[in-house]
Image (cartoon, grey):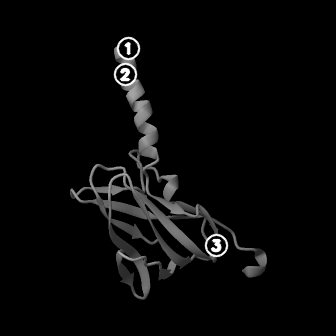
Amino acid sequence: MMKKLIPILALAIAIPATASAHVSVWPRESRAGATEKYTVRVPNESKVASTALELEVPDGVTVETLAMPAGWKHEVKKKDDRIVAITWTLTIPPGEFAEFSFIALNPLDGPRLVWTVRQRFADGTVEDFTKNARGEVRPTVVTTLTPRPAAAR
């Protein structure tokens, strides 16, 4: 009986640790058409250093400015004049985290923003934090948009 319980207990302990390690985008709710400060929280629960974070900007979102604390580097990819992707580079040791921020204008309508996020590690591995193993969008990378007030339309 005890041999059967050990794998179950190990899984129960591992699931919360893994779930807390997901990259997240804040805030989780904003208003359509609003200018918002977004923060991407990047924990490193790996045994090797994290070296980069890649963020694809959802359609309709206009990135206006990027926060640039000392020691970080970034590269932006543009389509026409709009930033469509941002890659931040910074070594994040195991057991630590970093936060990357930017100011963006939300689209005027739509129910939600889904942020595509990939974390790169020193051993060459890449973790996609947008979808889970079943292909479902993780709630940690979704910003729900509330409608604009009627007077603002």
Asked which secondary structure carries label 2, the reply is: helix
The answer to which of marks 2 and 3 sits earlier in the sequence is 2
Q: Residue furthest right?
A: 151
Question: Do callouts 1 and 2 mark residues in contact (Cβ within 8 Å)?
Answer: yes
Closer to viewer: mark 2 or mark 3 = 2
Horizontal side of residue 9 vs 124, given as left or right: right
Residue visible at 42% across and 81% down in the picture: 83
Horizontal side of residue 107 vs 123, given as left or right: right
Q: Is residue 42 visible?
A: yes
Residue visible at 45% across and 45% down in the picture: 19
Q: In the depicted view, which residue is nearer to us: 95 or 146?
A: 95
The quadrant of the rendering that contains the C terminus is: bottom right
Q: Which mark is residue 94?
A: none
Q: In the depicted view, which residue is nearer to us: 101 or 86?
A: 101
Based on the displayed image, in which of its 4 quarters is residue 118 positioned?
A: bottom left
Q: CA distance from mark 1 to mark 3?
A: 54 Å
Residue visible at 69% across and 69% down in the picture: 147
Q: Residue furthest front?
A: 70
Residue hosting label 2: 6
The location of residue 56, given as percent across then percent down, is 41, 70
Q: Is residue 60 visible?
A: no
Q: In the depicted view, which residue is nearer to us: 101 or 77?
A: 101
Give the residue type that dot 2 points to.
Ile
Asked which secondary structure carries label 1, the reply is: helix
The quadrant of the rendering that contains the N terminus is: top left
Horizontal side of residue 124 vs 85, given as left or right: left
Give the residue type that dot 1 points to.
Met
Q: CA distance from mark 2 to mark 3?
A: 48 Å
Residue hosting label 3: 32
Residue hosting label 1: 2
